[in-house]
Amino acid sequence: MIDNTNDPTFAELSIGDKINGMATVVACTKVCNREIGEVYATWIAVCVKSADDYHPYAVWSIVARPEGWSAGHGDYAFTLKEALEFYEGRGGK
């Protein structure tokens, strides 16, 4: 049996996780499981950034990569309500 406990590509994204020190996950839905040699696990997530940020909410695709969490393909929002609409539109539950 392979021990994956220290492999970031097998991490599971959870509410409260920090993404690259700049945002906190407040909702997430897993959309793709890790398949060795094929694909990394991927989630759609609503994240809260700094209140000073022009758009304090982001909806990102977050991938568990070897170097840690990778966030991209964002939709940015002024309000949580708007962010949740983006999230649901992208398949978040």
Image: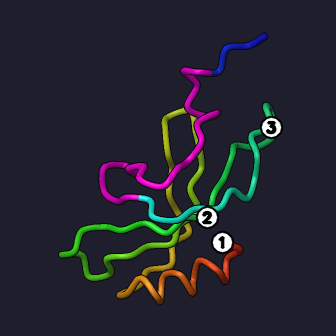
Residue 7 magenta-highlighted? yes
CB under 8 Å between callouts 2 and 1? yes
Q: Judge the density around disc 3: few (<14), some (14-19), many (≥20) Cα neighbours within 10 Å.
A: few
Mark 2–mark 1 distance (CA, rounded to whole Å): 6 Å
In the displayed structure image, the side of residue 48 where residue 73 appears, left or right = right
* The label number, if any, that marks residue 62 in the structure image: none
Q: Judge the density around disc 2: few (<14), some (14-19), many (≥20) Cα neighbours within 10 Å.
A: many
Name the amino acid, label 2: Ile
- Residue 41 locus on image (x, y percent): 69, 46
Task: Magenta stretch: give its range.
Answer: 5-24
- In this rendering, the label closer to the viewer, 3 or 2: 2
Mark 3–mark 1 distance (CA, rounded to whole Å): 21 Å
Q: Residue at x 61, y 64 (%)?
A: 44
Q: In the structure shown, which secondary structural element does the residue marked by tag 2 occupy?
A: strand
Q: Judge the density around disc 1: few (<14), some (14-19), many (≥20) Cα neighbours within 10 Å.
A: some
Q: Which residue is mark 2?
A: 44
Residue 11 magenta-highlighted? yes
Which of the marked residues, 3 or 1, is nearer the chain's N terminus? 3
* The label number, if any, that marks residue 92 in the structure image: 1
In the displayed structure image, the side of residue 61 where residue 20 appears, left or right = left
- Residue 25 locus on image (x, y percent): 44, 59
Occupied quadrant, residue 12: top right
Q: In the structure shown, which secondary structural element does the residue marked by tag 3 occupy?
A: loop
Name the amino acid, label 1: Gly
Which of the marked residues, 3 or 2, is nearer the chain's N terminus? 3
Q: Which residue is mark 3?
A: 35
Name the amino acid, label 3: Glu
Q: Residue at x 65, y 61 (%)?
A: 29
Q: Main secondary structure of the magenta part?
A: loop
Q: Residue at x 35, y 87 (%)?
A: 78
